[in-house]
Amino acid sequence: MNLIVTQRHTENEYGDWTDSLENAYVSTFENAGFTLFPISNSFGSVESFLTKVDYHGILLTGGGDVGVDKTRGIGPNQRDQLEFSLLEYAVKLKVPVFGICRGMQSINSYFGGDLERNIRELDQNNVHATPSRHQVRIFDTKVVSELNGDKKVEVNSYHDHGVTIDGKGEKLSVFAFFEPLNLVEGLYHEEFPIAAVQWHPEREERLQRIDSILLEAFKNKELFWK
């Protein structure tokens, strides 16, 4: 399955903006049966890129923060604009999308949601240190069935921003949740084949069972990607 994949966008020591993609994405998704086609944040025309690549899905990766902040009146940064354009095409053409960490936050922002930008301030009992591991509750019955009835799974955590239930975007439903801080850890769109997780499957030494289930479903257009 061919995927268009987004990349980090950072300024180097010379003041030049650069794109980068962690090798772990390539190896993890290649081992799961995907081929990645990175798109630059500076690409002028998303439509032009899409017409030149034989793609079957879109992967919105982690790394960096979503720039758009409605509460402070801050508009989207360059990477936001690229990812929002990709999501616009995904919605129009019903292209499967999988978001990871920042990718989930980007999806939530695109559909009108807000972000919690200071999780550490909420975390008075230090139950969500970064980086760390913690358990999340799985709500989706089909996923629970694939997990042989397990309703809790352990995942990694590398994020300081996140999505709360109150900040969830329009027509987005929750399938994974971190109860102590009211944080969404997995969500999907009710109408389009778009879903995401807040954790990083590619940073595991070996794929967790939950990640194998989600990647296989994404590849086969099952579960949230039908």
Image (cartoon, rainbow, N blue to C red):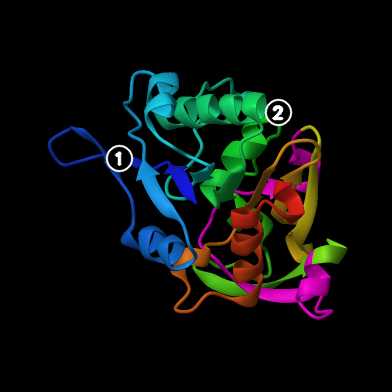
Which percent across, then down, holds residue 180?
A: 77, 65
Amino acid type assigned to the residue bearing label 1 in the image: Thr
Which percent across, then down, holds residue 166?
A: 80, 42
What numbered label is drawn on residue 10? 1
The reply to whether residue 4 is in sight is: yes
The reply to whether residue 117 is in sight is: no
Q: Is-magenta flag for residue 154?
A: yes
Residue range (magenta): 143-169
Q: Is-magenta flag for residue 148?
A: yes
Considering every residue shown, the one lying at the far left of the view is 14
Give 115 or 225, whichever is nearer the viewer: 225
Residue at the (48%, 73%) spot, across then down: 204
Say which residue label 2 marks: 112
Considering every residue shown, the one lying at the far right of the view is 141
Q: Is residue 35 left or right of residue 42?
A: right
Distance from the alpha carbon under mark 2 to that under mark 1: 25 Å
Q: Could you tell which of marks 2 and 1 lies nearer the N-terminus?
A: 1
Residue at the (55%, 52%) spot, across then down: 101
Residue at the (33%, 57%) spot, across then down: 22
Whether residue 194 is situated above or below residue 101 in the rendered picture: above
Amino acid type assigned to the residue bearing label 2 in the image: Gly
Q: Secondary structure at mark 2?
A: loop
Whether residue 67 is situated above or below residue 142 in the rendered picture: above
The quadrant in which residue 147 appears is bottom right
Residue at the (44%, 78%) spot, across then down: 205
Q: Secondary structure at mark 1?
A: strand
